[in-house]
Image: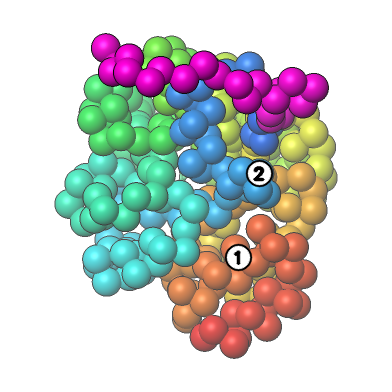
Amino acid sequence: MADLDDLREGNNFGLGIASGEQPFHVKGASHLLWGMKDRLSRIFNPSTGRTVMLAFDHGFIMGPTSGLERIDLTIVPLIEYADCLMCTRGILQSLIPPSTNKPICLRADAGTSILTELNDNVLIDVEDAIRLNVSAMAIMLSIGDPSYEAKTVANLYRAVDLGSRYGIPVMGVTAVGKQMARDARYFGLASRICAENGANIVKTYYCEGFDKVVAACPVPVVIAGGKKLPEKEALELCYQAINDGASGVDMGRNVFQSVAPAAMIQAIHGVVHDGLTPDQGYELFNDLA
Ligand code: 5RP
């Protein structure tokens, strides 16, 4: 019990001043509990409502792909510029310094490689995600794939059940199969299915008509970068996505395969958070590079 000596009566009740409760800055998250909101706030900057996530989970399917051969040399120096890191638990535990204090979006399913077909993935044990203190779990959905659609939707569903129990948000990642059209109808369908099944964030690809994909998705949408583009085009992609309502990016190759990765991620940050146009972003990239 606190010392009762000189216990002072409260006398500063702010009478007449409205309560300081704030509207929440993440789409579709107003009704979530505190732990979820805290984790989402670590990913989405409360001042802009947006995020620049750095994705380097590619090795879980692709192995040591270009730019990720030595994560200690190529990715660790970029951490300071990212709002959130997306990676597997193996890379997190072996190469990412725990002192970075950045939120982690953990790749939380696995089970395939580039040598085989997509995708009979299994889920991580949520206790491992808790032990790793992650801020979100990322689960892939193969919508439209007759063999694996149901399995991957079930994975997302299960991850949401487990994540909700412990206050860990889930990001649904829409896979792109070889036969699937990469258009607003497809990405709109896949994104909406992620959200309907409880995903708190959706990661998908930019396409024409992206504003409709975002509008019909009740939670924040972030874009993957996809294959490496010239830097100016990648910044245009970010700009268009933000303009169409995306809440940020979760990019990999267009950062770590850039000729100047640190300059690139800072230019992306400028477009996502500071309202830079692609030309301004490219100018910043060239200045920093
Ligand atoms: C694959 C992923 C990757 O992290 C994603 O593709 C992001 O990387 P890139 O910007 O290189 O496309 O989630 O499921």
Q: CA distance from mark 2 to mark 1?
A: 15 Å
Mark 2 highlights which residue?
Answer: 49
Ligand 1 within 8 A of label 2's CB? no
Q: Position of residue 194 (x, y in %)?
A: 59, 25
The disc at residue 176 is none
Which residues are the magenta region?
1-23
Q: Secondary structure at mark 2?
A: loop
x and y percent of residue 212 in the render? 81, 37
| Main SS category, magenta section | loop
Q: Secondary structure at mark 1?
A: helix
Residue 5: within the magenta?
A: yes
Q: Residue at x 28, y 63 (%)?
A: 71
Q: Residue at x 68, y 83 (%)?
A: 283
Q: Is residue 120 above or below residue 289?
A: above
Query: Which residue in the structure is indicated by mark 1?
Result: 268
Q: Residue furthest left?
A: 94
Q: Residue at x 73, y 77 (%)?
A: 280
Q: Is residue 172 visible?
A: no
User: Mark 2 or 1 closer to N-term?
Assistant: 2
